[in-house]
Amino acid sequence: MGILNATPDSFSDGGRHLEPWRAIDAGRQMLDDGALIVDVGGESTRPGAVPVSPEEEADRILPVIEGLAGMPVSVDTYRPEVARQALAAGAWLVNDIGGLRDPDMLAAVRDAGAGAVIMHMQGTPRTMQHMPQYGDVVAEVRDFLVDQASASGLDDVLIDPGIGFGKTLEHNLALLRNLDVLVGTGLPVLVGASRKGFIGSLARGTDAAGRDPGSIAVHLDAARRGAAMVRVHDVAAHVQALKVQEALL
Ligand code: HH2
């Protein structure tokens, strides 16, 4: 899954794809490079991010989704009204960081006969990194994802532990080291670690632009442990790494 943020302030690609033609070109390039789907977002959800209005979010993403019509596109939104418009404009899948907790979001996905990514998040982007707390992070995340997937009644879902969404470094590592627990649910697992802060913490001081090597390391490991999909900024580098790994297994 290639990440395409039509935002001014995303932590890694903010501002690069704000004009629709740039975003459409970048999305086509990701598909050419081997992405299975392009994930179009119109609001940054990095820690501390301030929400934009639904109108602003829709204005940013709809021209991009329309420009990629007929191609595999998901929409990265937690707002049902934005999801409905994106699905009508041609998106195939809703990537909901809210984990389908909002009944209107579930209705939007159902009405369109679409699929969804159900992601786990503790708190909200504004506050989630203040003091995330769990008893057993792996079991709690698994139970939430399995419950949401089965309550949704949808045929086509992926589950995602939500790396960095209300999680400390130790929580992220526990989820990645124990990915078999999520894979063991039988639901396809998506992992999104691309350029995230915990990679900077492990490789001290590396800024977002320098975190692709660490991102590839995490995603290769996730694929070996059975992840069905990884959500990444640098599609070409990941496709190459995954192909080589596959040949070696
Ligand atoms: N991470 C981000 C956004 N959406 N969706 C899923 N399913 N999984 C993730 O891990 C995930 C996500 C945050 O990353 P990014 O889109 O690169 O940045 P920003 O939120 O600043 O736009």
Image (spheres, grey):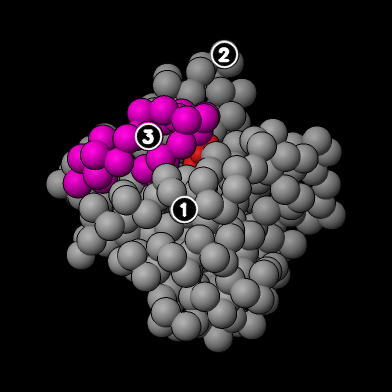
Residue of label 3: 18
Magenta region: which residues? 3-28
Can you tell which of label 3 and label 2 is closer to the viewer? 3
Residue 74 placement, left or right of 20: right
Question: For numbered disc 3, what is the local secondary structure?
Answer: loop
State the image coordinates of residue 70 (x, y, percent, origin top left): 20, 65
Q: Earlier along the polypeptide chain: callout 1 or callout 2?
A: 1
- The three-letter code of the residue at mark 2 reads Gly
Q: Earlier along the polypeptide chain: callout 3 or callout 2?
A: 3
Q: Is residue 18 part of the magenta span, yes or no? A: yes
Nearer to me, 192 or 7 = 7
State the image coordinates of residue 150 (x, y, percent, origin top left): 60, 82
- The three-letter code of the residue at mark 3 reads Leu
Q: Is residue 115 part of the magenta span, yes or no? A: no
Residue of label 2: 205
Question: For numbered disc 1, what is the local secondary structure?
Answer: helix
Can you tell which of label 1 and label 2 is closer to the viewer? 1
Question: For numbered disc 2, what is the local secondary structure?
Answer: loop
Q: Residue at x 42, y 40 (%)?
A: 5
CA distance for labels 1 and 2: 35 Å
Q: How crowded is mark 2: few (under 14 residues within 10 Å), some or many (20 or more)?
A: few
In the picture as drawn, the residue positioned furthest to the left comes out as 32
Residue of label 1: 58
Residue 16 placement, left or right of 83: left
- The three-letter code of the residue at mark 1 reads Ala
State the image coordinates of residue 85 (x, y, percent, origin top left): 43, 65
